Image (tube, helix red, strand yellow):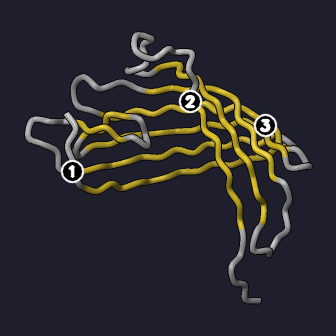
Amino acid sequence: RHYPTNGFEVHLRGLGLAKFGPVAVRSDTNAYYSDVDIRSGDTVYYHPRLDLLMPDRGWGLTSDEDLAYVSDFGLVAGVRYSVATAFVDGEGPGSIMRLGPLAAYTFFDDPGSTWNKPTLIAMFQWWLIHPSRTGQDTHQGLPYIAVAFRFDGELWRSD
């Protein structure tokens, strides 16, 4: 049953980056500890950003692994593997694994400008494992799709 609640979350992150010529490798691992005021008898809550049933007063872990080709004209193309799990005492809700292509295109790079590096990003991932995507309610062939636009810039600069 759905009901409002509150609490807090601590987020720890480890990021590893390496580039060998035009090939880039990225590992982004995140640990989450949460303490949420849930009803007596409830042991987990749904965390929509992580798509996990997270334990109250417990830990969850996510990791995104990227392997990509980085061009000299603004294109990045590769593959991402994502895994997420929550550490629940006893029988847990299960892990999530996704795999699929990613692409990003940066239109220009003008360092020091207010509007810099406008980038269009697209990612399509298919669930390899998901406790709720069994194919009964939602077809397993339906991908996770993320499309984003980002940019950098400097509002004020002091030399």
Residue drawn at x 50%, y 14% as measured from the top left = 139
89 vs 136: above or below? below
Q: Is residue 117 left or right of residue 26?
A: right
Q: Quadrant of the N terminus?
A: top left
Whole-Å distance between the Cαs marked 2 and 3?
17 Å
Task: Identify the amino acid type marked 3.
Answer: Ala
Instruction: Answer few, some or many: residues within 10 Å of disc 1's Cα (few below 14, many 20 plus, some between 14 and 19).
Output: few
Find disc 2 in the rendering and name its residue: 144
Q: Quadrant of the C terminus?
A: bottom right
Task: Identify the amino acid type marked 1.
Answer: Thr
Q: Is residue 136 left or right of residue 3?
A: right
Residue drawn at x 60%, y 38% as measured from the top left = 146
42 vs 13: above or below? above
Find disc 3 in the rendering and name its residue: 77
The residue tagged with tag 1: helix, strand or loop?
Answer: loop
Find disc 1 in the rendering and name its residue: 5
